[in-house]
Image (cartoon, rainbow, N blue to C red):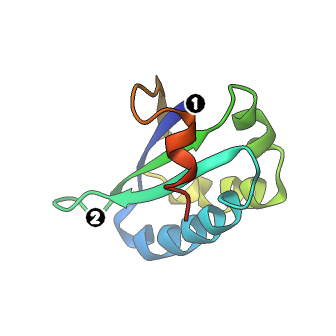
């Protein structure tokens, strides 16, 4: 499993538009066979900051995700909404193991 945290800082006047576009992308992303989870979280004390928590089954799955129409639409739609370039950090899961993620998939 590969977990990617994508940190996004959105312009204050673009928060709702970013949320809409990102939720649309997330709903499509969880349908991909290589995606175990795709969570969108928003910072409580600064509504302009989001983290996308993307859990992939294999190291090659993020590249496949980036080839999808819904990702490319999201990328192009939200680019001008960001206050700064997004950044990401990659993690390897320790717990649960790969089988445990399947029971968590909604």
Q: Position of residue 17 (x, y in %)?
A: 51, 74
Q: Position of residue 57 (x, y in %)?
A: 65, 36
Relative to 35, 13 lies left or right: left
Instruction: Identify the residue under disc 1.
Output: 1
Query: Mark on residue 44?
Result: none
Relative to 50, 6 lies left or right: right
SS category of the residue bearing label 2: loop
Q: Identify the residue at horizontal 47%, vertical 56% (top origin).
A: 39
The residue nearer to you, when weighing 102 against 92, is 102
Q: Which label lies toward us, 2 or 1?
A: 1
* Vertical position of residue 101 compared to residue 92: above or below: below
* Vertical position of residue 12 compared to residue 91: above or below: below
Instruction: Identify the residue under disc 2.
Output: 47
Quadrant of the frame with the N terminus:
top right
Cα–Cα span, label 2 and label 1: 29 Å
The residue nearer to you, when weighing 50 against 97, is 97
Quadrant of the frame with the C terminus:
bottom right
The residue lying furthest to the left in this view is: 45
Q: Identify the residue at horizontal 65%, vertical 59% (top origin).
A: 30
SS category of the residue bearing label 1: loop
């Amino acid at each position: 499993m590969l977990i990617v945290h994508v940190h996004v800082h959105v312009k204050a006047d673009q928060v709702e538009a970013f949320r809409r576009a990102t939720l649309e992308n997330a709903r499509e992303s969880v349908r991909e066979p290589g995606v175990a989870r795709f969570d969108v979280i928003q910072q409580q004390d600064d509504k302009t900051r989001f983290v996308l928590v993307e859990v992939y089954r294999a190291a090659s799955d993020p590249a496949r995700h980036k080839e999808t129409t819904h990702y490319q639409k999201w990328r192009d739609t939200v680019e001008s909404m960001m206050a700064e370039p997004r950044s990401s950090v990659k993690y390897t899961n320790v717990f649960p193991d790969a089988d445990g993620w399947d029971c968590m998939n909604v």
